[in-house]
Amino acid sequence: MAKCKKAPKRFDEINVIPFIDIMLVLLVMVLTTATFIKQGVIPVDLPKAKKADKQDVKKELNIYVNAKGELFFEKEKVDLKELRTKLETISKEQTVVLRSDKESRFQDFVSVMDILKELKHEQLYIVTKE
């Protein structure tokens, strides 16, 4: 009797299990690294600017204006009077960084700027997103 050779089995489907495993590993890596990325301690949604210069700022003082109009000086909640007294004690050459939420009132921003101008602080940066 003659033996018949079997034809090789044809693969009509792609095995997607290894692909799913790789995608799950990548998803876990993205989610774990995304939770560690943080803009700052006080949540401020910065406005965007088309022509923003990146500056290397060293030893800066931070002033925040959040969406509710609350003022923060170096993570400490202050009002305008307290902000003025704190700014009076620092040097005029000290760099001040102002981060104002795009949803905050413009008047809050102007009030902080008035204090800085009145006290003759020239080293001022206003932070925006690109």
Image (tube, helix red, strand yellow):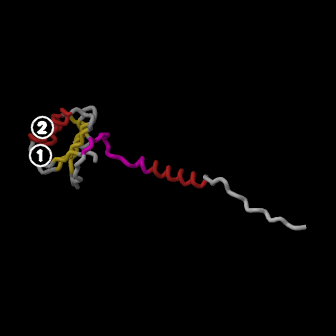
* Residue at 73 percent of width and 62 percent of height: 8
Could you tell me residue 72's position as x and y percent?
24, 39
Residue at the far right: name it. Answer: 1
Residue that numbered label 2 is attached to: 114
Q: Quadrant of residue 45?
A: top left
* Residue at 59 percent of width and 55 percent of height: 18
| Three-letter code for the amino acid on which mark 2 is drawn | Asp
Disc 1 is placed on an element classified as: loop
Is residue 39 on the magenta stretch? Answer: yes
Could you tell me residue 52's position as x and y percent?
23, 49
Around disc 1, counting alpha carbons within 10 Å, would you say few (fewer than 14), some (14 to 19), or many (20 or more)?
some
**Looking at this view, is 123 or 61 the one in front?**
123
Q: Earlier in the sequence, mark 2 or mark 1?
A: 2
The span shown in magenta is 33-49
Could you tell me residue 130's position as x and y percent?
28, 48
Q: Is residue 31 left or right of residue 9?
A: left
Question: Could you say which disc has been placed on residue 121 in the image?
Answer: 1
